[in-house]
Amino acid sequence: MAEQASFEEVAYLLLNGELPNLKNLVEFTRQIAAERELAAQVVKMLRLMPRSAHPMDMLRTGVSMLGVFDPELNDNSHAANVRKSIRLIARVSTLITDGWRILHGEEPLPEKPDLTQAGNFFYKLKGEVPQ
């Protein structure tokens, strides 16, 4: 599957039980890109972690923080859970890249919504737009 489908296509498949058509893929990709940015409180928490923290500890704590600050925290309807899933899909890569940069004394980079999830991940980690 990984050789024939993009990250966004596989994520859509997992959430919806089928691969997206082009219209659905474009909309789903847009939704993910729109949800990548972390809440200021989450970034503050990343900055408070000691530089000796293991990246997995940072990720675990960050995912917990995402849940606490989710605007639909107490809505467990199917539609809300799908929206929460999209936010989680979008923000985990940001937690990883921003956390990595902070642990290494660098500032997190802004999101590039025109890039795919994988492209944005690479850009935010390395500071270079992938070719």
Image: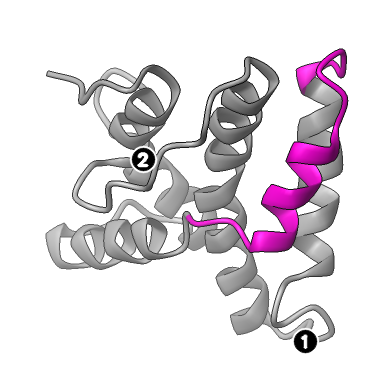
What's under tag 2, amino acid-wise?
A: Gln
Residue nearest the observer in this picture, 46 or 119: 46
Tell me: 47 left or right of 98: right
Is the image coloured rainbow, by chain, by secondary structure, or in one colour? one colour
Tell me: 91 left or right of 112: right
Q: Are marks 1 and 2 in contact (CB under 8 Å)?
A: no
What's under tag 1, amino acid-wise?
A: Asp
- Highlighted magenta segment, given as a residue range: 37-55
Disc 1 is placed on an element classified as loop
Quadrant of res 20 = bottom left
Residue bearing mark 1:
75
Residue nearest the observer in this picture, 99 or 20: 99
Tell me: 63 left or right of 81: right
* Residue for point 54% across, 41% down: 94
* Residue for point 12% across, 18% down: 131
Q: Position of residue 68 (x, y in %)?
A: 84, 67
Judge whether residue 39 is colored magenta: yes
Q: Is residue 125 above or below residue 66?
A: above
Q: Position of residue 11 (x, y in %)?
A: 46, 47
